[in-house]
Image: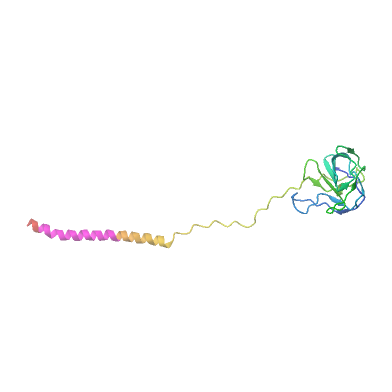
Amino acid sequence: MFRRVLALHPPVDAPIARPFAYAGSPFARGLHRGIDVAAPPGTPVEAPCAGVVAYAGPHALTLRCGRYRVTLLPVRAVRARQGDAVVAGARVAQVGATASHPGLHLGVRAASDAFGYVDPAPLLAHSPSMPLGPAPAPRTPRLPARPDPRPVPPAPEAPPAPVTAWAALVVAALAATGTTRLRLRLRLRRGRRRAPTRAAGEA
């Protein structure tokens, strides 16, 4: 089942010099949120779609075409003003020139999503009835991090009591036993010494 997303009229008659490259995080380096068309400065620029001018500046022009915003830059000699209604194919500006961006940049994004850029190349069509395929997702979600496949090491067992602690307990027990025996012997000796004295007193 096909659904027409947006049919774009080619703004200039020139080949694509740099393709669309936008996937993953919208803040990743090296992304290109549109296509660059190899057109020299001064080339007439035509409106790629029918809509309303959302922004008209000295170097950029943005049209609101249905659910999408279509941006052209760099441009010069802009003829349209903000709020003007334009038809597809109407001349709206000329290709400008910048040192960092040669040619004409064409960008398309969903109007409801600041990062919802889509590839304009499949949308360039000469016939508005041409099937364009299913609507692309406005944004590519970031995949969750994969769990670590390495096994978690078990918690270390508590170390046994040191030998010195057991030895100290044994020595203390032996000492207590020896002290008790020594006290018993002393009592027996005292009792033997006192026995003859009591007998002599009674005689």
What percent of the width, then of the height, locates residue 158? 49, 57
Residue 62 higher or lower than 175, as above or below? above
For the C terminus, which image quadrant?
Answer: bottom left
**1 relative to 201 in the view: left or right:** right
Examine the rendered structure and indicate whether residue 173 appears above or below residue 7: below
Q: Position of residue 31 (x, y in %)?
A: 78, 52
- Residue 72 in magenta stretch: no
| Apparent side of residue 170 relative to residue 11 in the rendered image (left or right) | left
Q: Residue at x 18, y 59 (%)?
A: 190
Vertical arrangement, residue 203 with respect to residue 76, above or below: below
- Residue drawn at 83 percent across, 42 percent down: 69
What segment carries the magenta color?
A: 178-199
Q: Residue furthest left?
A: 203
Quarter of the rendering containing residue 198: bottom left
Residue 156: x %, y % from top left: 53, 57
Q: Quadrant of the N terminus?
A: top right
Front-most of 31 and 159?
31
Q: Colour scheme used in the picture?
A: rainbow
The x, y position of residue 164, in whole percent, is: 41, 62
Instruction: Say which residue appears at 33% left-offset and 61% top-offset.
Output: 174
Main SS of the magenta segment? helix
Left or right: residue 160 versus residue 188 is: right
Q: Nearer the viewer, residue 180 or 112?
A: 112
For the point 42% across and 62% down, the residue is: 163
